[in-house]
Amino acid sequence: MITHEAGDLTCTVEAGVYLAELQEHVARGGQMLALDPPDHGLTVGAVFDRALFGPRAHRYGLPRDLVLGVRARLADGTVVHGGGKVVKNVAGYDLPKLFTGAHGLLGELLELTLRLHPLPAATMTLVAPPFDPHVVERFHPACVEIAWPGETMLVRFESPVAAELARAAQAEIGGELILDDERLWADHRERQHGLHLHRCLPADVGLTVEQLAGRGATAVVGRPARGWLFADVAVDESVPTALEQRVIERFASR
């Protein structure tokens, strides 16, 4: 079900394996799949088929950034292979990225080869009032999150020097440091469950939150530095995005 090549920081896993089971397996080798969506019995295949992600996407990227190879069954029963089993692979069409997030429209994922990362040696979280998320980028955080309402931002550092980085960020933006932060992040990831993804420019996060609140949203969480927000209202194509609204206002003023 799972082939773990710890020396290459990769694993090959059947799509039906549960995400929690995969994480437990590779953790025994000191590694992790750096995807942490709210896990309600998710399989690895479901995570990549639906392109699900959580707070760690701020640093490690989206599912399409972590998939190296796939084996899939097309609608006519043909089994196809794409990508490879190593990080440096450039052969053939990029089927792995094409299948990621396709919601089964291209076929059924059977097996995936994934890129792994080392488990963090230490973690520390800074909980602070709202600030420009790019201010902390030079401290290399793993997660930078907003939680609305509550006017709170959470910044997690994952490295051997997590405490030093967190204190340096605190000196610049204030806030409270939390060392034992696993429960905090488990609860925060859970806030995303059932919410709808809204994409915007990072510069438009504040305006987008205001628009979502105006449409009746009561919960917004997400990655402000990447422009990925989750809210309890669905995407409405008839409502202009913050960027579109700025363009409309600019032309209206002429």
Image (tube, helix red, strand yellow):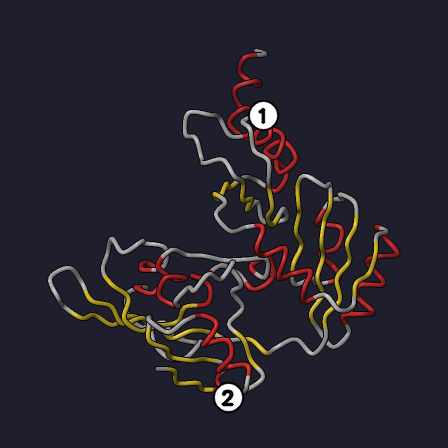
Q: Residues within 10 Å of mark 2 (few under 14, many from 20)?
A: few
Residue under the image location 86 percent in, 51 percent down? 174
Residue that badge 1 annotates? 214
Residue that badge 2 annotates? 7
The answer to which image quadrant residue 201 occupies is: top right
What amino acid type should be assigned to the residue bearing mark 2?
Gly
Residue under the image location 50 percent in, 45 percent down? 195
Q: Position of residue 157 (x, y in %)?
A: 72, 65
Q: Is residue 58 above or below residue 69?
A: above
Separation of marks 1 and 2 at Cα, in angstroms: 50 Å
What amino acid type should be assigned to the residue bearing mark 1?
Gly
Q: Secondary structure at mark 2?
A: helix
Residue under the image location 74 percent in, 59 percent down? 138
In front of the other: 53 or 252: 53
Q: Are marks 1 and 2 in contact (CB under 8 Å)?
A: no
Q: Is residue 176 above or below residue 217?
A: below
Q: Nearer the viewer, mark 1 or mark 2?
A: 1
Residue under the image location 58 percent in, 49 percent down? 226
Tell which circle, 1 or 2, labels the residue nearer the N-terminal end.
2
- If the image is split into quadrants, where does the C terminus sit? top right
Q: Residue furthest left?
A: 76
Q: Secondary structure at mark 1?
A: helix
- If the image is split into quadrants, where does the N terminus sit? bottom left
Task: Give the numbered dot on residue 104.
Answer: none
In front of the other: 88 or 215: 215
The answer to which image quadrant residue 137 occupies is: bottom right
